[in-house]
Amino acid sequence: MKKLVLAGYVACLFTACSPTATLTPGAEVVKVMKGDPSPTCKEITSIDATLGGWPGTRSLEPYKNDLRNKAYENGANYVRLDTVLYSEGGTIMSVAGTAFMCP
């Protein structure tokens, strides 16, 4: 069993494995932006993306997809990106945002 886990880990290293978050159907309409939304938008909830504790990646896109999915599940169509937490090695460990419903 240990050899199988080690083989999977090594294969992942050589294939440039990175965390992914597949978009839920419909979630592609959710905008993820750094700035505040229009004043006409209603704040829904705070959301975060950690991608299941994976060691992290330098790409923000999988985390944005996870935020889009969570926002969509809560009826939001806009996410203000509030915080990106980096590890000492420079990989992204978690991302937090605020979900809004905008007309």
Image (cartoon, rainbow, N blue to C red):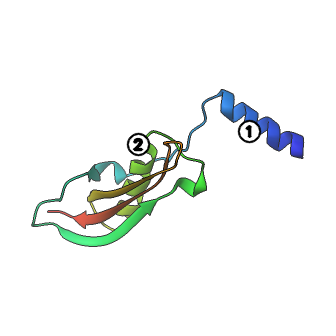
Q: Element under label 2?
A: helix
- Density class for disc 1 (Cα within 10 Å; few <14, some 14-19, many ≥20) is few
Q: Is residue 15 visible?
A: yes
Residue lying at 85% horizontally and 41% vertically, measured from the top left: 4
Q: Which mark is residue 9?
A: 1
Residue lying at 53% horizontally and 42% vertically, measured from the top left: 89
Question: What is the distance, in whole Å, between disc 2 and disc 1 at their CAs?
Answer: 23 Å
The residue labelled by disc 2 is 61
What residue occupies the far top of the structure in this picture?
A: 14
Q: Which of the pair 69/15 is nearer the observer?
A: 15
Quarter of the image where one finds residue 15: top right
What residue occupies the far front of the structure in this picture?
A: 88
Q: Element under label 1?
A: helix
Quadrant showing the C terminus: bottom left
Q: Is 80 displayed left or right of 39 in the figure?
A: right
Query: In the rendered image of this protein, does residue 3 appear above or below residue 64?
Result: above
Q: Position of residue 91 (x, y in %)?
A: 50, 43
Q: Position of residue 54 (x, y in %)?
A: 60, 50
Q: Is residue 26 visible?
A: no
Residue type for callout 2: Glu
Quarter of the image where one finds residue 16: top right
Query: In the rendered image of this protein, does residue 77 appear above or below residue 58?
Result: below
- Density class for disc 2 (Cα within 10 Å; few <14, some 14-19, many ≥20) is few
Residue lying at 41% horizontally and 42% vertically, measured from the top left: 61
**Mark toward the start of the polypeptide (2 vs 1):** 1
Mark count: 2
Query: In the rendered image of this protein, does residue 95 appear above or below residue 10?
Result: below
Q: Position of residue 40 (x, y in %)?
A: 10, 67
Q: Which mark is residue 62?
A: none
Residue type for callout 1: Tyr
Q: Which of the pair 20/6 is nearer the observer?
A: 6
Q: Position of residue 63 (x, y in %)?
A: 44, 50
